[in-house]
Image (tube, helix red, strand yellow):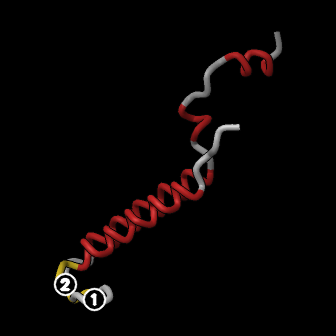
Amino acid sequence: MSAQDASRGRKSGFRDRLTPGRIAVGVLTILAIIFIFENTREVKIRLLIPEVTMPLYLALLAMFVIGALCGGYLFRRRPR
């Protein structure tokens, strides 16, 4: 039995799931979270009509979560 045959039968481990793309996304996510929580001053945010005063980190965190949800929805894997 060759090494290739043995690798087909086993389940993929943690190292198999760590691709360069996933590592890059993880690093960017950590940097985005650090950036969000470093900006804590109060800001005025206007969405169409109402004006809200809130900490900048909450506005950035909300946009990060919305972007992550949209990206996850658009790039999810569909069953074949």
Say which element carries label 2. strand
Residue 56 in percent (x, y) is at 25, 79
Q: Which mark is residue 78?
A: none
Residue at screen point 82% across, 15% down = 2
Disc 2 residue type?
A: Val
Residue 60 in percent (x, y) is at 32, 74
In depth, the one of 75 and 6 nearer the eye is 75
Residue at screen point 74% across, 15% down = 6
- Is 27 left, or right, of 48 in this rendering? right
Q: Kindly indicate the quadrant of the structure image that contains residue 41.
A: bottom left
The image shows residue 9, relative to residue 37, as above or below, that is above
Sequence-wise, the earlier of marks 1 and 2 is: 1
Which residue of the protein is positioned furthest toward the front in this rendering?
49
Say which element carries label 1. strand
Residue 24 in percent (x, y) is at 55, 58
Residue at screen point 19% across, 78% down = 55
Which residue of the protein is positioned furthest toward the top in this rendering?
1
Q: CA distance from mark 1 to mark 2?
A: 6 Å
The image shows residue 44, relative to residue 76, as above or below, that is below
Looking at the figure, which quarter contains the C terminus?
Answer: top right
Q: Residues within 10 Å of mark 2 (few under 14, many from 20)?
A: few
Looking at the figure, which quarter contains the N terminus?
Answer: top right
Q: Are marks 1 and 2 in contact (CB under 8 Å)?
A: yes
The image shows residue 3, relative to residue 48, as above or below, that is above
Disc 1 residue type?
A: Arg
Q: Which mark is residue 46?
A: 1
Residue 51 in percent (x, y) is at 21, 89
- Is 3 left, or right, of 41 in this rendering? right
Q: Which mark is residue 52?
A: 2
The image shows residue 5, relative to residue 71, as above or below, that is above
